[in-house]
Image: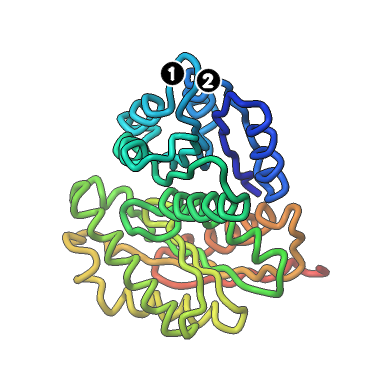
Amino acid sequence: MLLKKIVVAEDDDAIAHMVNMALGDAGFLCLRARDGEEALRLVRAHDPDLLVLDVMMPRLDGFEVARRLKSDVMWSRTPILMLTALAGTDHQIEGLEAGADSYMAKPFDLREFNARVKALVRAARRERDRNPTTDLPGSRAIDSHLEEVLKGGPAAVVHIDLFAFDAYADTVGFGVAEDTVRALAKLILDEARTQSGGGAFVGHIGGSDFLVVAAPAQAEAIARSVVEAFDARRAEIVPGDEGKPLALVAAVAPTEGLSAAHGIDDLGRRLGKAMKAAKAAGRSGIVIWTPPPGV
């Protein structure tokens, strides 16, 4: 599981200890910075889920830390919660304009503080973990979802890929290839929602690779409906495919018998074997993983 990390930039030991205890009890890993320069170093080194930032600190104040982070293309996505004794409206405005996403004045209520931290981390992770082409959950979000699924009841996973997509993208160009991926994403999402009644999880691994997680009884139906819909709408979804028609292949594997500890790796092997067999056929279709004899 991906541990949620928070950089706490606070030069007051008592307040830093209280914040670290509260966040530690909530399941966060806290990294302490005692001045603004150290806060910048920790953010750049650890890419945290949140920066809790005091304003009045040695070497570099919180306003300048926020400005530098938000002006950097790599770190501008890091959410900032300013926690400061400067409670006036002018200071709040300055903090928000410097780049803070939320602002709390000292003294503060720990319950409200925890609620704000969780809300900021939740919102930031939601945006970070989306694939920029399709706006679907990306690889990190997929891993997190699979970890939760493996702790629960039975499910099945569908891996969907457009076979020979790289060669097609080289022919039609980046823009058309991205349009194809977006159209394919919409088709998969629509079919998954229809077959599952809205309960399926759909993620975009990257390129033309997608993953659908659904109830065991729904997974095969989702895979078949996606492949059939693709073949019926091929010209619309894959413009410029004038050579050998692209094949949409799907592999289906259950999570049954997989442990939470190593389940994602074992699931990957199941899907890999099924996907290899699906691509070997050289045409659109699905392959369902079956356990080896004697298992």
Disc 1 marks a residue whose amino acid type is Leu
Image height of 267 relative to 70, above or below: below
Based on the displayed image, in which of its 4 quarters is residue 152 positioned? bottom right
Crowd class of label 1 (few under 14; some 14 to 19; many from 20; radius 10 Å)? some
Furthest-front residue in view? Answer: 88
Q: Is residue 51 left or right of residue 239?
A: right
In the rendered image, residue 3, in percent from the top left (x then y), is placed at 64, 44
Kindly identify the residue that appears in the image at 58 percent across and 21 percent down. 34
Amino acid type assigned to the residue bearing label 2 in the image: Asp
Task: Give residue 101's quadrant in the image.
Answer: top left
Q: Is residue 234 left or right of residue 262?
A: left
Q: Secondary structure at mark 1?
A: loop
**In the depicted view, which residue is nearer to us: 245 or 20?**
20
Residue beneath the point at 37% across and 79% down: 228
Q: Which residue is mark 2?
A: 35
Could you tell me which quadrant the C terminus lies in?
Answer: bottom right
Nearer to the camera, 236 or 288? 236
Q: Position of residue 192 (x, y in %)?
A: 44, 77
Tag 1 residue = 60
Residue 3 visible? The answer is: yes
Q: Tell how many labels.
A: 2
Examine the image and state in which quarter residue 138 appears.
bottom left
Secondary structure beneath label 2:
loop
Which residue is nearer to you in this view: 64 or 295? 64
> In this rendering, is residue 142 above or below 46?
below
Tags 2 and 1 touching, CB below 8 Å: yes
Question: What residue lies at 56% left-to-right and 33% top-to-bottom?
Answer: 7
User: What residue lies at 76% left-to-right and 53% top-to-bottom?
Assistant: 261
In space, the residues marked 2 and 1 are separated at their CA atoms by: 7 Å
Structural crowding at the residue carrying mark 2, measured as other residues with C-alpha within 10 Å and reported as few (<14), some (14–19) or many (≥20): many
